[in-house]
Amino acid sequence: MNKNTFEKVTLNKGEMAVYDFGNMKLHAYKTNDFIDDEVFIVEKDGQAVILESPCFFDNNEELTAYLADCKLNVAGMLLAYHMAGATFLPDVKKYATQNADEYGHTGGGAGLIQNFTAAFGDIFDSSIHTVTDYLKAGEVTIGGIRFVITQTAEAFDIAIPEINVVYTHMLGHDCHSIVAGEAHADAIIAQLRGYIADGVDMVLTSHYTPEDLKDVETKIAYLEELKNIAATSADGVAFKAAVKEKYPAYSGENYLDMTAGMFFQK
């Protein structure tokens, strides 16, 4: 499936890219919210499973209406890295690993929710989803759709074998990412090389539109260059300046700030 082959549906705030795989469809919801969230709906035989939750009230309402218009029965929601937005489909089953639940309620995810609440106020749905069904690594079938769960340090990634698609938290071939030092960069590179070896068609992430293996190769080169720049930089300030000079058009400078802080911890 070509990442650019989709039907575009324009909504009041966000927009939907609908990919038709024949026996299944993928609805990629670009929320156009303040933190560039993406939410994905996997559809098969009238059943739907949602990957991640929107977290602004207007997006919650918009996506709920879209699901109703499509007459989709939501069999469950997979919550990995984004646990906020619990007013969205409160009666639907919520699936997560134990570590993802902890990340969202008491760990780094909970800290981000607090920060976003302070930044955005009443428009942000700070309520946290309650997990109803815990997942373990391996295969699980929800709504007649097969998923493969891979636990990560913070939460979990998802493969959808029937459409040869994977979901992870971040990729973004032309934007900065949070990289917690050289070891973390190496771990991401190994993961991305695994996608190339597996020949996946698309990579879904919760802050970018669907990407392909060419984008994966671009990200690997970026991560290798980050390591090189870090090795020759005296401190985080010099590192950040050198990365910005190398990649002047990249977005996500706030992520670069975090990366610089983690490569050069005091």
Image (cartoon, rainbow, N blue to C red):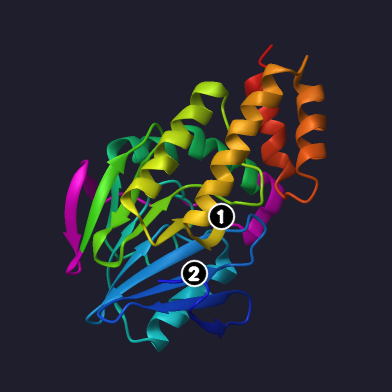
Query: Whole-percent x and y of residue 36?
Result: 62, 58
Q: Is residue 105 visible?
A: no
> What segment is highlighted magenta in the picture?
118-145
Most foreground residue, 223 or 157: 223
Give SS at disc 2. Answer: loop
Q: Is 143 on the left or on the right of 131, as rendered?
A: left
Q: Residue at x 72, y 40 (%)?
A: 254
Q: Quadrant of residue 237?
A: top right
Q: CA distance from mark 2 to mark 1?
A: 16 Å
Q: Is residue 246 above or below residue 242?
A: below
Q: Dot 2 surroundings within 10 Å: few (below 14), some, or many (20 or more)?
A: some
Q: Is 56 on the left or on the right of 247, as rendered?
A: left
Query: Whole-percent x and y of residue 137?
Result: 22, 41
Q: Is residue 115 above or below residue 241?
A: below
Q: Nearer the viewer, mark 2 or mark 1?
A: 2
Give SS at disc 1. Answer: loop
**Residue under numbered circle 1:** 207
